[in-house]
Amino acid sequence: MSGTFVGMPAFPEAARDAVRNPTLRGNLRHATHTIRAKRARAVAELDDWPALREAGRRIKDHTLRHLDRYLVQLEESVTAAGGTVHWAADADEANRIVARLVKETGESEVVKVKSMATQEIGLNEALLEEGIRAYETDLAELIVQLGKDRPSHILVPAIHRNRGEIRDIFRAEMGEWGRPAPEGLTDTPAELAEAARLHLREKFLRARVGISGANFMVAETGTLVVVESEGNGRMCLTLPETLISVVGIEKVVPTWQDLEVFLQTLPRSSTAERMNPYTSTWTGTTADDGPRTFHLVLLDNGRTDTLADQVGRQALRCIRCSACLNVCPVYERAGGHAYGSVYPGPIGAILSPQLRGTASEIDASLPYASSLCGACYEVCPVAIDIPEVLVHLRERVVEGGPAVRQGNKVILKPAKGHAAERAAMRAARWTFTRPGALRTGQRLASRTRRLHPRALPGPGRAWSATRDLPPVPAEPFRDWWQRTRGGKDGAK
Amino acid sequence: MSSRDRVLGRVRRALADVTPDERPYEEAVNRGCLREHGHRTPGQTVELLAENLADYRAIVHRGDAEELPDLVGRLLAGNGSREVLVPPSLPPGWLSAADVARLDDLAESTPHRLDQVDSVVTGCAVAIAETGTIVLDGSPDQGRRRISLIPDHHICVVRVPDQVVSSVPQALERLDPARPLTWISGPSATSDIELDRVEGVHGPRKLEVILLS
Ligand code: SF4
């Protein structure tokens, strides 16, 4: 993944710093709680939510188990509609393809709509090395880019910045990149947004190459879908002459009708809205409307390795709604940066170590960046059992075993005893000193009670080898208290 | 080996453990989701559309064919618009009472030129009541994607009840995926700065929807 994160400290250290940063914690708490409450209301409006969630799970699972077939079908439909399909086995290859395509247009700057896939492969940095400047156009991404920073949330990437900081960044940096911030810029959100509008519009209107990701690709029709709020997506998808979309191979769905499920579940899970302000779909190219040239780069970069893992492959169902971040007690305290990857929060804790392998210390520690409370599973609109995958990956880190890396079967060595144990124990200590995280952890222990082993997996094994684990109570005390006395929160 | 073959080969090897499921797609993903949420008369569906549009800060107006030209004229004047962008075949009467210069969207009009226009008037392909969404599909009364994007003020006319459906599933059935589609729910918005909602970062800041009966 992105070089930006190389050299990150393992999760517990990074998290410790984050916990000491009051701005970050305050903003995160506000954000996660606000979105969480709104989301519950938006979801409650649809009385078939469980059916939609199940349908989402099934569609994604069905697609994944026939992924080869659907990718080939997608390639055919996109080509038939006037697009060109490229395949990239890894980040380097994807970056090379995009750089070549941009150079062929003769341009040296591109406008980008926020895309996790391009961030994952470090596309902006790779393009810069080739002399191509990539401008992020999502307001939050602009704040991150101008602040020479990293995103900390999937949905609100600049949530770690408050308005005063944003004003300072705009004043100091906008001029370097294009139209400077207006004189006397204050820190009201409306003025800041206006400054961004003027700064970016200048770029949109002259841009000849746009780069995007996509939320969905429809195999049957060759249609790509981008879901967004600000209109910067529409700008990038519409005004340039050439559009290059870099999309993970797991984003394909079989049919046009499948979108009915995800266009209902994604906005409500993500921004807690009935519908996001803008959704654009395009099928190849259309005469006189939108880009004249369309390239689709299908990205593997660890996804097939993830697919090879029978427990972990369900992570590929993820539609990046970020609902799991907003309910995660560990994320709420640690913030997105501590995860050291493009994908923060619970989904990041299972996706990053699978996409990148668990060789580095940060990746080996990620499966421990959780209290296993299960809240992430409850909200996930495609029912990914994140706790199950976390436990599986912990075992993988500690015990090693067969895995697939870059398409080859390998036997992973157990992480060096002490290193793994240290990572685990540090994470455990970190969790246990935080009552909120621990409380929800207990809830999961109850929920999965019948699955509990008699001995602890992983580093706990030595300890439990000589002891019996106490049985887990059917219901944690605090849950019982809430259920019988509290009542108010019972519906959540 | 090409990267295409490499990736597809990896996919196939990764799935070696998966027992073949040759059930047809329809059966494998059989979904019991609702076609719409709640039962409503066509009139109630239009009411819900109006409510949800307003909830997402679109400004809703109503009128019949006779009132429409005056209404459009008033909205344009109210916005202080001097120039309005027009898709290739907007019904001729719609702008007959508007006292503004008209700019036809032509293939050669540059984004810079469109950026000088105050308003745009379009029809729509379908509107979704449950979500408060209007969908444009590039038909001649709606024009290219860019025209509803660059001007700061968008007036969209929805014919009720014909163009109104209840739900997302019903809308998808009506739409042709081969066309470039734009789904619009309220004006452009961001909540990126401390989660305060701000309208109009990049798209039109003002969306006015006329429910035409
Ligand atoms: S794992 Fe589920 S809840 Fe988390 S981002 Fe992905 S789809 Fe959303």
Image: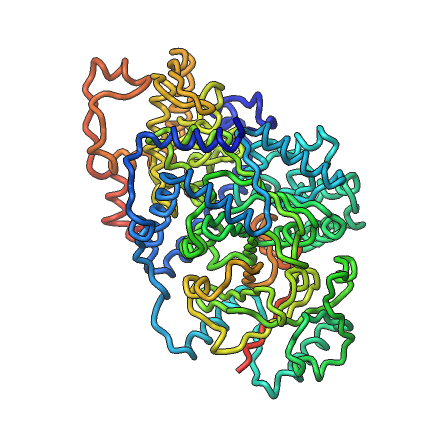
Q: Position of residue B194 (x, y in %)?
A: 58, 48
Looking at the picture, tell me which residue is in the foreground, A492 or B180: B180
Location of residue B15 with respect to A257 vertically, above or below: above
Location of residue A81 with respect to A350 vertically, above or below: below
Residue at x-position 64% and y-position 46%: A243
Q: Is residue A491 in sight in this rendering?
A: no
Q: Is residue B24 in sight in this rendering?
A: yes
Question: Which quadrant of the figure has residue A417?
Answer: top left
Location of residue A396 with respect to A339 vertically, above or below: above
- Name the quadrant where ligand 1 sits: top left
Q: Position of residue A490 (x, y in %)?
A: 30, 51
Looking at the picture, tell me which residue is in the foreground, A379 or B82: B82
Q: Position of residue B144 (x, y in %)?
A: 65, 63
- Residue at the far bottom: name it: B66
Residue at x-position 69% and y-position 64%: B152
Q: What is the count of numbered marks? A: 0
Looking at the picture, tell me which residue is in the foreground, A263 or A169: A263
Location of residue A452 with respect to B49 vertically, above or below: above
Q: Quadrant of the N terminus of chain A?
A: top right
Q: Position of residue A278 (x, y in %)?
A: 56, 57
Seen in the image, is B135 located left or right of residue A206?
left
Seen in the image, is A470 located left or right of residue B81?
left
